[in-house]
């Protein structure tokens, strides 16, 4: 069985605070023992700082080009999360090549929602224990704020359960992305600042700058993306309709489906997670599925798993 390499003996001798700082950049650093279910405030500092950085919009201002970049990055990264982190890595609902797998894992890593292996492992755990005491992001068990973000910031939340992802851990490039999960977001932030600075110099009529592009394109877009994504934990297990009598509290919510490109059809998904499509009815808008169909038409993905007829028949009786 594949397992995560342990930290070196020299790393284990580092002071606790320095070990905490190291975990900002290298998730292979050994986690502190005995506090797995409480927020690790030192390691959570960058997450908090990212939210505070959004306030800088008061100084950098706004321009159409900066907002357009923020919206575009939200859309591209949401598709990478929903189509690949979720429907591909976590549920294997279609097939693709290794290069395409890596490209979308790279885009997903830019979302600041950690690496693809971490994401898939936690999501598989969620499906196995949904809305029980073992599900850390269940609002019915742990409350809204813990299910929305608190669990994400604990030592247990930071860990990757490698026993759940043996099928993915065989790819060294995915293990690398998982280990250095802050590298891609940092490179994206630097690139956005550089783009804004270049536009300020070459096209001043656009009214943008390096700082503005950084704040809108990275910080605001990423924070909105994060909170939109985790509404599927905190809200779609509380608000909406239930077409299927699942063992959990999952619900279908059209507003969350629009916000998250189809993930809001959550009761559908929990009843049958093996389909690449989560909007089971024709009128259930599922932007991620449409995107996957486009990629399939282009030959980049294949074998999209459909919703079986027996599932559709079951839905018609509820």
Image (cartoon, helix red, strand yellow):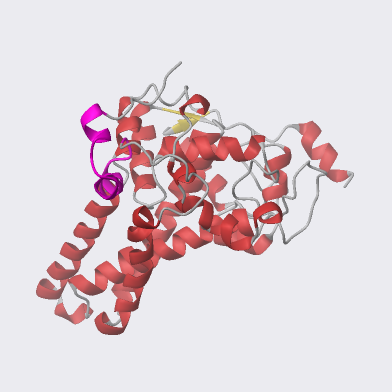
Outermost residue toward the right?
317
In the displayed structure image, the side of residue 243 where residue 254 appears, left or right? left
The part of the image, by quadrant, that contains residue 175 is: top left
* Residue 98 in the image: above or below residue 151: above
Please provide percent x and percent y for residue 14: 23, 40
* Residue 168 in the image: above or below residue 149: above
Please provide percent x and percent y for residue 133: 68, 44
| Magenta span | 8-28
Look at the image and tell me whether residue 77 can be seen: yes
The part of the image, by quadrant, that contains residue 313 is: top right
Front residue of this view, candidates 289 and 87:
87
Look at the image and tell me whether residue 294 can be seen: no
- Is 11 magenta? The answer is yes
Q: Residue at x 34, y 34 (%)?
A: 102
Please provide percent x and percent y for residue 249: 75, 50
Q: Residue at x 43, y 35 (%)?
A: 117
In the displayed structure image, the side of residue 133 where residue 160 appears, left or right? left
In the displayed structure image, the side of residue 50 where residue 120 appears, left or right? right
- Is 205 magenta? The answer is no
Q: Residue at x 18, y 70 (%)?
A: 210
Outermost residue toward the top?
1
Q: Residue at x 52, y 57 (%)?
A: 150
Front residue of this view, candidates 238 and 14:
14
Please provide percent x and percent y for residue 40: 41, 53
Front residue of this view, candidates 296 and 208:
208
Q: How many marks overall?
A: 0
- Secondary structure character of the magenta stretch overall: helix
């Amino acid at each position: 069985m594949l397992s995560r390499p342990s930290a070196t003996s020299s790393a284990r001798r580092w002071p606790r605070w320095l070990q905490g700082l190291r975990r900002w950049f290298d998730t292979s650093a050994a986690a502190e023992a005995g506090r797995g279910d409480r927020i690790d405030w030192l390691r959570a500092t960058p997450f908090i700082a990212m939210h505070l950085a959004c306030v800088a919009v008061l100084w950098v201002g706004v321009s159409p080009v900066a907002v357009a970049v923020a919206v575009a990055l939200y859309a591209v990264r949401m598709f990478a999360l929903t189509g690949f982190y979720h429907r591909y890595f976590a549920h294997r609902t279609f097939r693709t090549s290794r290069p395409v797998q890596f490209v979308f894992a790279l885009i997903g890593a830019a979302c600041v929602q950690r690496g693809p292996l971490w994401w898939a492992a936690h999501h598989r755990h969620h499906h196995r224990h949904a809305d029980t005491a073992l599900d850390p992001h269940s609002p019915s068990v742990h409350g809204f704020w813990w299910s929305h973000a608190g669990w994400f910031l604990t030592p247990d939340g930071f860990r990757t359960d490698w026993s759940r992802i043996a099928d993915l851990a065989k790819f060294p490039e995915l293990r690398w992305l998982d280990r250095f999960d802050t590298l891609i977001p940092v490179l994206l932030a630097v690139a956005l600042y550089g783009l804004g600075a270049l536009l300020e110099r070459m096209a001043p009529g656009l009214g943008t700058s390096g700082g503005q592009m950084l704040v809108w394109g990275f910080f605001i877009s990423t924070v909105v993306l994060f909170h939109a994504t985790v509404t599927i934990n905190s809200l779609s297990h509380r608000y909406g309709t239930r077409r299927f009598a699942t063992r959990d509290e999952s619900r279908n919510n059209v507003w969350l489906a629009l916000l998250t490109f189809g993930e809001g059809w959550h009761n559908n998904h929990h009843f049958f997670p093996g389909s690449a499509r989560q909007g089971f009815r024709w009128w259930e808008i599922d932007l991620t599925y449409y995107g996957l169909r486009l990629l399939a038409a282009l030959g980049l993905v294949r074998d999209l798993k459909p919703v079986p007829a027996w599932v559709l028949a079951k839905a018609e009786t509820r």
